[in-house]
């Protein structure tokens, strides 16, 4: 914002109206907040997609470990079940990779490399405006110093020279200030036009992925239910087997 480290050389005249300075600080503050929120959103999306990939890779690893289990050599039914699970996990991982690639391409990269790249340029423009303001203040103070002196020939000559130096610096500041005051609200108000297509793509990617997951696990469920046993009977059979395991001497008591 308008930070003034030293009071030396500050003019007595208020060269920038307080209302203008407040408007500038308000608009720039909104964009600083938008920059921070955009950065956090990009990082959170990256963490989310990394976690999604780790989940599906772990699921594939588990199914592969089960396939190498000696039980698969001893029981054909168990082998068939694990093979079906392995196929489902690999399909899930493939669709998950497609989803992550889509999110990376249409959401994360635009946030980071396109929308996010605007803020360094904006911050640089604000710094240039601040430097122009400091130069304006310094030269305005110089003009005021000569205006307060006795109007001798040398003083009038220096006053004229100071005013000539001030004019282009004042014009430069006013141009930079006007441009930022015009463009900052316009950029802030256009954020929805930029974000909406990316987040529509994010939603579509999620919908496609979970629709495919419904199909994959629906197929897996049908394969596991080929025995025709109802859930209640399967639960009873599982409980009976667990009771047999609990009865073994190598199983510790609870």
Image (cartoon, rainbow, N blue to C red):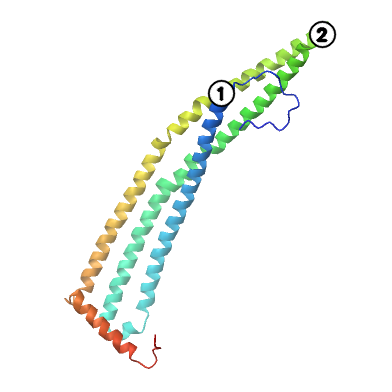
> Is 117 in front, or is 14?
14
Which residue sits at x=45%, y=58%? 50
Marks 2 and 1, the one that precedes in the sequence: 1
Instruction: Report x, y in % for residue 24.
Output: 55, 28
Q: Quadrant of residue 12?
A: top right
Disc 1: which residue? 20
Q: Which mark is residue 165?
A: none
Q: Say if residue 76 shows up in the picture.
A: no
Q: Is residue 122 left or right of residue 194?
A: right
Q: Is residue 251 above or below residue 34?
A: below
Q: Is residue 99 above or below residue 55?
A: above
Q: Quadrant of the C terminus?
A: bottom left
Q: Is residue 106 left or right of residue 4?
A: left
Residue sitting at the far left? 228
Q: Is residue 69 above or below residue 128?
A: below
Instruction: Report x, y in % for residue 217.
Output: 27, 65
Which residue sits at x=26%, y=77%? 80
Marks 2 and 1, how far apart at CA: 34 Å
Which residue sits at x=28%, y=80%? 78
Which residue sits at x=44%, y=48%? 108
Instruction: Determine the secondary structure under disc 1.
Output: helix
Residue sitting at the far bottom? 249
Q: Quadrant of residue 25?
A: top right
Instruction: Determine the secondary structure under disc 2.
Output: loop
Residue sitting at the far front? 254
Q: Quadrant of the N terminus?
A: top right
Q: Say if residue 47 shows up in the picture.
A: yes
Q: Which mark is residue 150?
A: 2
């Amino acid at each position: 914002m308008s930070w003034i480290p030293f009071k030396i050389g500050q003019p007595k005249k208020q060269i920038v109206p307080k209302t203008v300075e407040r408007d500038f600080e308000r608009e720039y503050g909104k964009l600083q907040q938008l920059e921070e929120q955009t950065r956090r959103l990009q990082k959170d999306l990256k963490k989310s997609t990394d976690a999604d990939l780790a989940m599906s890779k772990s699921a594939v690893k588990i199914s592969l470990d089960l396939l190498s289990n000696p039980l698969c050599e001893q029981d054909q039914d168990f082998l068939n079940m694990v093979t079906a699970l392995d196929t489902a996990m690999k399909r899930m991982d493939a669709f998950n990779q497609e989803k992550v690639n889509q999110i990376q391409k249409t959401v994360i990269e635009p946030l980071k490399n396109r929308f996010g790249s605007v803020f360094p340029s904006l911050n640089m423009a604000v710094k240039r405006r601040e430097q122009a303001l400091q130069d304006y203040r310094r030269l305005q103070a110089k003009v005021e110093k000569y205006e307060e002196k006795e109007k001798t020939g040398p003083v009038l000559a220096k006053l004229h020279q100071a005013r000539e130096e001030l004019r282009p610096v004042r014009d430069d500041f006013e141009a930079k200030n006007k441009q930022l005051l015009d463009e900052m609200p316009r950029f802030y108000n256009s954020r929805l036009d930029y974000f909406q297509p990316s987040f529509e793509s994010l939603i579509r990617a999620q919908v496609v992925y979970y629709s495919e997951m419904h199909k994959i696990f629906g197929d897996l469920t049908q394969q596991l239910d080929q025995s025709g046993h109802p859930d209640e009977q399967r639960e009873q059979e599982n409980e009976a087997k667990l009771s047999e395991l609990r009865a073994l001497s190598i199983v510790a008591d609870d």
